[in-house]
Image (cartoon, rainbow, N blue to C red):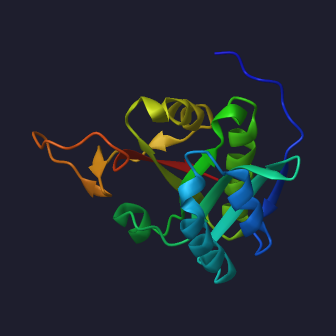
Amino acid sequence: MKQKPLLKITLKALSPSDLDVFHESFKGTYLSDRFDLFKKYLKEHLDKTRYVLLACYNAKIVGYVTLQYVSEYENFKKDNIPEIVDFNVVPCFRRSGIGRKLLKRIEYIAKESGYDQVGIGVGLYDDYGVAQRLYVKMKYIPDATGVHYDKKPVKAGTKVTVDDSLAIYFTKKL
């Protein structure tokens, strides 16, 4: 697939004034029902338990990523690895470099916060194909713990549903 031309994107930390922009930016998209989650993210961002980074284009939010300082994934938690969680670019803006910019900046923020590596989980079905390729291109490597469902290891022979809860985890040295 051909990459779209790079757009003039502004990256910024989430602020209270962005809630209305979020609601307006994602109206009618698959992200429109995430307003309550975004309010939770704002609280966690202000409490400094999560960092929320926005990608803006023409006064609209076209993507975002969050860095959860204490991961809910046990392997990251025990090794003090912050986790990149909830990484989204609006579909019509994908393949234009926004995801790469968000990822690079959130890695920088993790490093500036004193971490030497960062982790990320990715789904295993085709909706996550672009993300899977991006993480490999950006030098993320599997954490060698296999497939997980709801952040718990899946044992050989176990039947699971292929949905957003089925994932593998990657890490990257910063």
Work out whether residue 43 or residue 146 is closer to the camera in this orientation and state it.
43
Which percent across, then down, holds residue 15? 77, 72
Instruction: Name, please, the residue furthest toward the bottom.
Output: 47
Locate residue 117: give its quadrant: bottom right
Q: Is residue 108 visible?
A: no
Q: Is residue 95 left or right of residue 133?
A: right
How many marks the image carries: the answer is 0
Which residue is pictured at 45% across the width and 44% down the height? 122
Q: Residue at x 61, y 73 (%)?
A: 39
Task: Say if 51 sits above or below 167 in the image.
Answer: below
Residue found at x 30% / y 57%: 150
Residue at far left of view: 157
Where 41 sits versus 163, above or below?
below
Image spot of residue 87 (x, y percent)? 59, 50
Q: Position of residue 129 (x, y in %)?
A: 49, 30
Q: Is residue 162 visible?
A: yes
Left or right: residue 149 compared with residue 90: left
